[in-house]
Image (cartoon, rainbow, N blue to C red):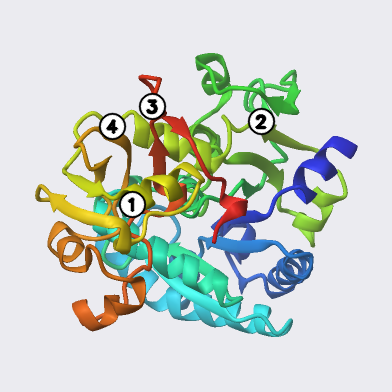
Amino acid sequence: MAASVTRLSAHKSIVIKIGSALLVDRESGLRADWLASVAADIATLSKAGKQVLVVTSGAIALGRTTLRLPRGALKLEESQAAAACGQISLARAWEQALGAHAITAGQILLTLSDTEERRRYLNARATLSTLLRLGAVPVINENDTIATSEIRYGDNDRLAARVATMIGADLLILLSDIDGLYTAPPHLDPAAEFVPHVAAITPQIEAMAGSAGTELSRGGMVTKIAAGRIATAAGTAMVIASGKRLHPVAALAAGERATWFAANGNPVTARKKWISGQLGVAGSIVVDAGAISALANGKSLLPAGVRSVEGDFSRGDVVLVCGPDGLEIGRGMIAYDSGDAARIAGHRSARIAEILGFAGRSEMIHRDDLVMKPVAASEPVLVGEIENNV
């Protein structure tokens, strides 16, 4: 138990995923008392200095109750109609529950493509990061009113994992109607054994998951393991815990039984490994000697240190960073399209809004998105850590 408490308290950025079966009663609708208890848990985390994001299901479940739709599988258009009605109630419920603790809620509706297409991914990440910086709690749900294949086959477990990796969270909590992973589905196999810790998600671990859950809980353990694969590969630890009781996050912090999935490194390291491995770079930028010195000391690349821009690339692409001699000194994820990057090259960050007509990022490449290549080595090394941001 002590190890679980330590694991939870050590994390700074936490995504909490809540399923429909926990939040919505099939007959009476929203479980207001349960939601209030979760909001109190979130308030406790916020007061402890944690950044918290919520990925919540429940729009379709609430909407189908409001519209008096029958039990069982819904047609696509019925699901979308239910989501349209239910999302209003869901957002209002979260606003009121968090507002009781003087916490501002910000609603974000995403589809899986919003977390996969580069520009939409970056825009979503910027919105989430700004909400967190301003002290709000983002409340995220899949945009079921417009989704097609996602609404039939998608799930908020994997969406939560993508959100966690998008903003660099170090912990993903999946609240479920079960307290963790078992060697077999316990409702089918009475001899199934509880698995408290998963060091790596192997085919054997995947085989332990059963099929999808109830009509309200679409994911089941299969999608939770899939979420774990996404999260842990990106440096985010994950835990599957029971959400049936009141104050489930507080119970987890107190050491209640759950299954913990170890992260593969940390979010910053994972992202930089991905950047360093990109062979199909989209362009390059040439920097001056002053910028080279700053980058070697773990600083971000500012427009003032850029001499020239080459290639046709878009915001979020990986580009080479070259010295005055044209040799690669590193590579990073660029914050501007090539045209805009060329316009602000050589200028101070304070002039970006004047030149472009909008206030963009002050960094051309942020230190967390930059991998430097040492002079006497063939492989890039990681520089800068997220806690040392300027």
Query: Looking at the picture, which amino acid does disc 3 mark?
Result: Val
Query: Looking at the picture, which amino acid does disc 4 mark?
Result: Gln
Check the image and report above or below for 33 versus 100: above
Q: Is residue 165 visible?
A: yes
Q: CA distance from mark 3 to mark 4?
A: 19 Å
Query: Looking at the picture, which amino acid does disc 2 mark?
Result: Leu
Q: Nearer the viewer, residue 198 or 186?
A: 198
Q: Secondary structure at mark 2?
A: strand
Q: Tell me what residue is drawn at x 18 percent, y 59 percent.
A: 337
Which residue matches tag 1?
112
Q: Is residue 1 visible?
A: no
Image coordinates for residue 150, horizontal then vertical, percent? 31, 51
Which residue matches tag 2?
181
Q: Earlier in the sequence, mark 2 or mark 3?
A: 2
Among the 4 quarters of the image, the one containing residue 104: bottom right
Q: Tell me what residue is drawn at x 73 percent, y 22 percent.
A: 190
Q: Tell me what residue is drawn at x 55 percent, y 23 percent.
A: 201
**Residue density around tag 4, few if under 14, some if 14–19, many if 20 or more, within 10 Å:** some
Q: Which mark is residue 375?
A: 3
**For the C terminus, which image quadrant?**
bottom right
Q: Which mark is residue 278?
A: 4
Along the horizontal axis of the image, is 172 left or right of 309? right
Check the image and report above or below for 362 versus 55: below
Query: Looking at the picture, which amino acid does disc 1 mark?
Result: Leu
**Residue density around tag 2, few if under 14, some if 14–19, many if 20 or more, within 10 Å:** many
Q: Earlier in the sequence, mark 1 or mark 2?
A: 1
Nearest to viewer (mark 2 / mark 3): 3
Q: Which mark is residue 368?
A: none
Q: Tell me what residue is drawn at x 75 percent, y 28 percent.
A: 196
